[in-house]
Image (cartoon, rainbow, N blue to C red):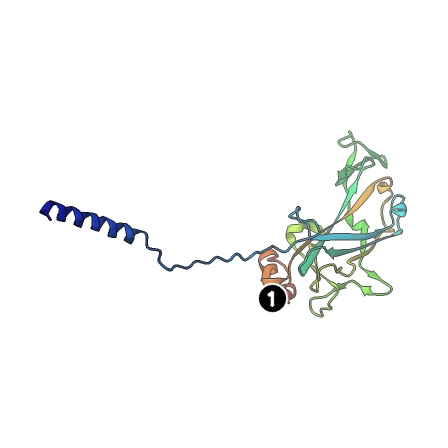
């Protein structure tokens, strides 16, 4: 066999071996796992602020014609509409309104009569929300507020917060509220003080209740409600999210 043929065969053999080597299938392995998660939800998942609901029993008919000394039923509590335990707080604001329903903080008087603002010779008088008296007790359950020095679960702690003005700040419910459960009543009724001056006749007033909830677990309350009473923060520390 000629030298050229031998060299050609060697090259061809090398190409065949190379081709075989390139197509080897090594033993390999692979795996994948997907763990589905879902965030805790509420009765209205599309609303980021959902999760609680204020309930009230309010005597609107009597409220529309309130006289000094009248006691108007306004029972207020809060429901947990989330799928997780919550801590709940509320604040109450009292405002005076004119006959058109616009919020006002003062009236103008001249010769004993209310007149438009800045009327010549008229005197401005600041309206006092203390004449709107909030009642936190009833004959069955007694006072719905509890003192920090002698705490009772199922009642509300009043925490004065200077940033909230004269209305006194937040009321904190002293217990963990489970899903679908309610707080105890905060407010029971509203009275127009017998000492309300005659100049207030014909005015309107609102009692506005706002409430907030925060997950009870993982110490969230200490981060979200930094001015909360220590007793409320302790409730958050002791709550397990996954019972």
Q: Looking at the rendering, in which quadrant would you find the C terminus?
A: bottom right
Hey, which residue is sitting farthest top in the picture?
A: 120
Front one among 199 and 185 = 185
Q: Position of residue 77 (x, y in %)?
A: 77, 56
Horizontal side of residue 191 vs 20, given as left or right: right
- Above or below — where is 101 with respect to 6? above
Picture residue at 23% right of the left edge, 48% below the top: 15
Front one among 132 and 113 = 132
Q: Position of residue 150 (x, y in %)?
A: 71, 70
- Badge 1, how many Cα within 10 Å: few under 14, some, many 20+? some
Front one among 47 and 155 = 47
Picture residue at 87% right of the left edge, 41% below the top: 201
Q: Image quarter for residue 224?
A: bottom right
For label 1, the SS is: helix
Horizontal side of residue 80 vs 227, given as left or right: right
Hey, which residue is sitting farthest bottom in the picture?
A: 150
Q: Position of residue 54 (x, y in %)?
A: 76, 52
One can see residue 192 in this view: no
- Above or below — where is 55 with respect to 205? below
- Above or below — where is 214 with respect to 105? below
One can see residue 126 in this view: yes
Q: Position of residue 227 (x, y in %)?
A: 61, 58
Q: Image quarter for residue 136?
A: bottom right
Q: What residue is disc 1 on?
A: 237
Horizontal side of residue 2 vs 75, given as left or right: left
Hey, which residue is sitting farthest front in the picture?
A: 1
> How many marks overall?
1
């Amino acid at each position: 066999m000629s030298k050229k043929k031998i060299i050609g065969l060697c090259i061809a053999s090398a190409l065949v071996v190379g081709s075989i080597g390139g197509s080897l299938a090594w033993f390999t392995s692979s795996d994948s796992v997907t763990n589905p998660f879902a965030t805790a939800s509420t009765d209205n998942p599309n609303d980021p602020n959902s999760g609680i609901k204020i309930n009230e029993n309010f005597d609107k008919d009597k409220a529309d014609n309130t006289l000094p000394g009248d006691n108007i039923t306004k029972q207020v509590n809060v429901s947990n509409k989330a799928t997780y335990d919550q801590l709940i707080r509320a604040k109450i604001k009292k405002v005076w309104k004119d006959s058109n329903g616009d919020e006002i903080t003062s009236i103008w008087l001249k010769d004993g009569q209310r007149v438009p603002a800045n009327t010549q010779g008229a005197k401005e008088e600041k309206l006092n929300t203390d004449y709107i008296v909030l009642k936190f007790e009833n004959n069955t359950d007694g006072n719905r507020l509890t003192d920090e020095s002698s705490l009772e679960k199922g009642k509300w702690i009043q925490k004065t917060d200077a940033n909230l003005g004269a209305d006194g700040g937040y009321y904190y419910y002293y217990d963990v509220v489970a899903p679908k459960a309610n707080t105890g009543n905060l407010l029971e009724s509203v009275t127009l003080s017998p000492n309300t001056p005659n100049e207030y006749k014909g005015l309107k007033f609102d009692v506005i209740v706002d409430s907030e909830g925060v997950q009870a677990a993982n110490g969230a309350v200490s981060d979200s409600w930094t001015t909360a009473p220590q007793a409320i923060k302790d409730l958050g520390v002791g709550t397990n999210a996954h019972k």
